[in-house]
Image: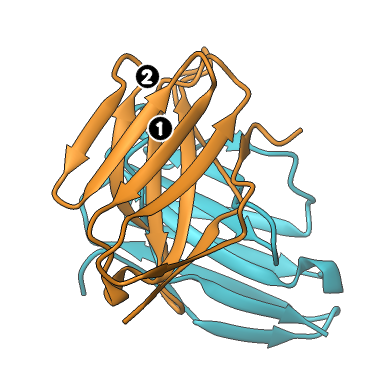
């Protein structure tokens, strides 16, 4: 595998379900990011991790819970989501967060909340 | 408050002609400006960037122009090819006084290049 991978690519979940999104980067980077892209809206930064430490939480509701066990893996745990949370969730990585203008993105997970 | 705006949702161009994608921003503290390209079912991929101290950067068929006084940047693709058909995102970066930086994206412009 090369670059940034995300699984699953598509996810449909009910509002009472608990699910997790997974991101893995094979670039040797130290910073990882979660973004949300809703229809006809710009990408919105959700979380930033630098060397496994969370350095940014962009006022994201607690029903989204990130986890970064090491610099290569990033998870987004989801529980009791709302239909308006349906969106494309993108993971990205960069060498470190100080050089976050060079971000490499995964293909995204298309999430539908029913 | 949207700091980076792409006012044209879509652009249609004939193959071989020039494509010009535009972007406006409001924050004069941005340090870098970037263009990302996104194909369906793929994540955005970095295309070209420009530092805020420059006014032009060229890479093959792609040139980015920055007009700081107008807070405007543009991406020129010459000549346009059908494979350039994608969504193009303008993004701006600033360290913002933190130990890390932050990318702010525009809404994207769908470019269609017709054969």
* On screen, residue B71 above or below A84: above
Q: Which mark is residue B52?
A: 2
* On screen, residue A17 above or below B4: below
Q: Which quadrant does the N terminus of chain A fall into?
A: bottom left
Q: Chain of mark 2?
A: B
The chain coloured orange is: B
- Answer whether residue A70 is visible to the viewer in this image: no
Is B65 or B43 nearer to us in this picture? B65
- Answer whether residue B42 is visible to the viewer in this image: yes
Q: Colour of chain A?
A: cyan
Question: Label 2: how many residues lie within 10 Å, few (<14), some (14-19) or many (20+)?
Answer: some
Question: Label 1: how many residues lie within 10 Å, few (<14), some (14-19) or many (20+)?
Answer: many
Q: Secondary structure at mark 2?
A: loop
Choose the circle earlier in sequence order: 1 or 2. Answer: 1
Report the residue that reaches farthest toward the left.
Answer: B60
Both labels 1 and 2 in a single chain: yes
Residue at the image position 50 percent from the left and 82 percent from the top: A8
Task: Classify residue B79 by image quadrant.
Answer: bottom left
Give coordinates of residue A68: x percent, y percent: 47, 52
* On screen, residue B5 above or below A83: above
| Residue named by callout 1 | B33
């Amino acid at each position: 595998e090369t670059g940034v991978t995300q699984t699953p690519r598509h996810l449909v979940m009910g509002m009472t379900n608990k699910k997790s999104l997974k991101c893995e980067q094979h670039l040797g980077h130290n910073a990882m990011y979660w973004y949300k892209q809703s229809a006809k809206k710009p990408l919105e930064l959700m979380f930033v991790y630098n060397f496994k430490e969370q350095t940014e939480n962009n006022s994201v509701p607690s029903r989204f819970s990130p986890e970064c066990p090491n610099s290569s893996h990033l998870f987004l745990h989801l529980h009791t989501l709302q239909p308006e949370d349906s969106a494309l969730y993108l993971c990205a990585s960069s060498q470190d967060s100080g050089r976050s203008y060079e971000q490499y993105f995964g293909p995204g997970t298309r999430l539908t909340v029913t | 408050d949207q700091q980076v705006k792409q006012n044209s949702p879509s652009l249609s161009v004939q193959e071989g002609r020039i494509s010009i994608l535009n972007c406006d921003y409001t924050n004069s503290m941005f340090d870098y400006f970037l263009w990302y390209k996104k194909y369906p079912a793929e994540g955005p991929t970095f295309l070209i960037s420009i530092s805020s101290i420059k006014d032009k950067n060229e890479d093959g068929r792609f040139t980015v122009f920055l007009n700081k006084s107008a807070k405007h940047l543009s991406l020129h693709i010459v000549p346009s090819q059908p494979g350039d058909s994608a969504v193009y995102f303008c993004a701006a970066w600033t360290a913002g006084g933190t130990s890390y930086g932050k990318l702010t994206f525009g809404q994207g412009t769908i470019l269609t290049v017709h054969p």
